[in-house]
Image (spheres, grey):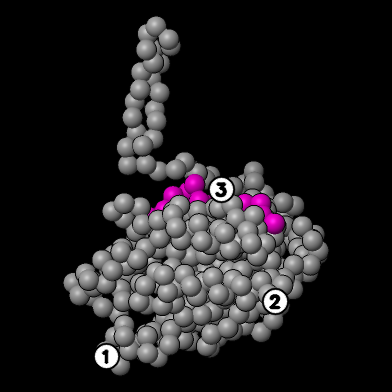
Amino acid sequence: MPEKLRVAAVQIAPSLESLEGTLERVLNALAEAASKGAKLVVFPETFLPWYPYFSFVHPPVATGAEHVRLYENAVIVPGPVTEAVSEAARRLGVVVALGVNERDHGSLYNAQLIFDADGTLKLKRRKITPTFHERMIWGQGDGAGLKVVNTAAGRIGALACWEHYNPLARYALMAQHEEIHVAQFPGALVGPIFAEQIEVTIRHHALESGCFVVNATGWLTEQQIEQISPEERLRKALRGGCMTAIISPEGAHVVPPLTEGEGILTADLDLGLIVKRKRMMDSVGHYARPELLSLLLDDTPTAPMRTKISSPPETGSGENVLNDA
């Protein structure tokens, strides 16, 4: 990995009309970030096709039509959308971290995808516990996605939104020596206090992990806010909460954050700062006490069914084998 790395965090509005519309915005932003020299580009939480803002401001009984529309526009992995992003990553030579609503047959999941610079999908993980209103929209992920992957931009781990309030989930990535942590939040939610909380959270993780954090939050236009809710008292919950930022292992902003409007935040990372931080405090190395405190992670992929297969007597030992379906 080079000693200097340019990264980008994207804060733009989705299309609330179609998956294709938001995908076009993703591909355009990728090309723009690459033209600025970025080698890692991070997008917001479930940006494709859009974050389910409707579920935050409307009761479940009133959201059936929008929930179905989200199903109809959700991303199948692998599929045409991932093929398009993969091709763009390969052509532009960039690593891409993208949040999607993933459809797996009859369920939706909050998924984070990391594509390497050669277009390979290196990681697909699902948010392990959807938050509050999100539990009406998405299923739960499993421990199989709590992993750090090697990419052209270094060792990258990822968590979504309030997963950062789960210290054991963060420690699972720290223990795998992530160099760059991808954080994704929805943005345009709750108000200014959410932006403040995001900033505290990502700066703390950078300090504790001794890694860089690249965080992307989304944005909604006033027209989109009106489209989601006709009531002004509810629209207040769809403004603010944006903190697109790039944080160093010392817990400092590498460049000023983006908290309003659309834009692409870029910064050059001095990767030597990782060692500078960790020589003083390596929370999974010389500053750890694993004989006293350690983490047990079950990274077995979950499956709704397992089949028990007996080996034929003439070819096997008759032992039973369990296969996941």
Rendered image: mark on residue 158:
none
The residue that appears at 30% across and 93% down in the rendered structure is: 232
Q: Earlier in the sequence, mark 1 or mark 2?
A: 2
Q: Which of marks 1 and 3 is nearer the N terminus?
A: 1
Is 268 placed above or below 195 here? above
Residue 291, percent from left and from top: 64, 43
Which quadrant of the figure has residue 138?
Answer: bottom left
Spatial CA distance of label 1 from label 2 is 40 Å
In terms of depth relative to the viewer, which is nearer, 204 or 217? 217
Q: Is mark 2 on a helix, strand or loop?
A: loop
Which residue in the structure is indicated by mark 3? 295
In terms of depth relative to the viewer, which is nearer, 266 or 278? 266
Q: Can residue 303 be seen in this view?
A: yes
Residue 179, percent from left and from top: 69, 59
Q: What residue type is labelled 1?
A: Glu
Of circles 3 and 2, which is in front? Answer: 2
* Quadrant assignment for the N terminus: bottom right
Spatial CA distance of label 1 from label 3 is 46 Å
Which residue in the structure is indicated by mark 2? 36
Is 255 placed above or below 131 here? below
In terms of depth relative to the viewer, which is nearer, 204 or 96? 96
Q: Which amino acid does label 2 sit on?
A: Lys
Q: Which amino acid does label 3 sit on?
A: Leu
Which quadrant of the figure has residue 278?
Answer: bottom right
Is 287 placed above or below 45 here? above
Residue 202, percent from left and from top: 59, 71
Magenta-tinted stretch: 140-152
Which residue in the structure is indicated by mark 1? 231
* Residue 148 highlighted magenta (yes or no): yes
* Quadrant assignment for the C terminus: top left
Q: Residues within 10 Å of mark 3 (few under 14, many from 20)?
A: few
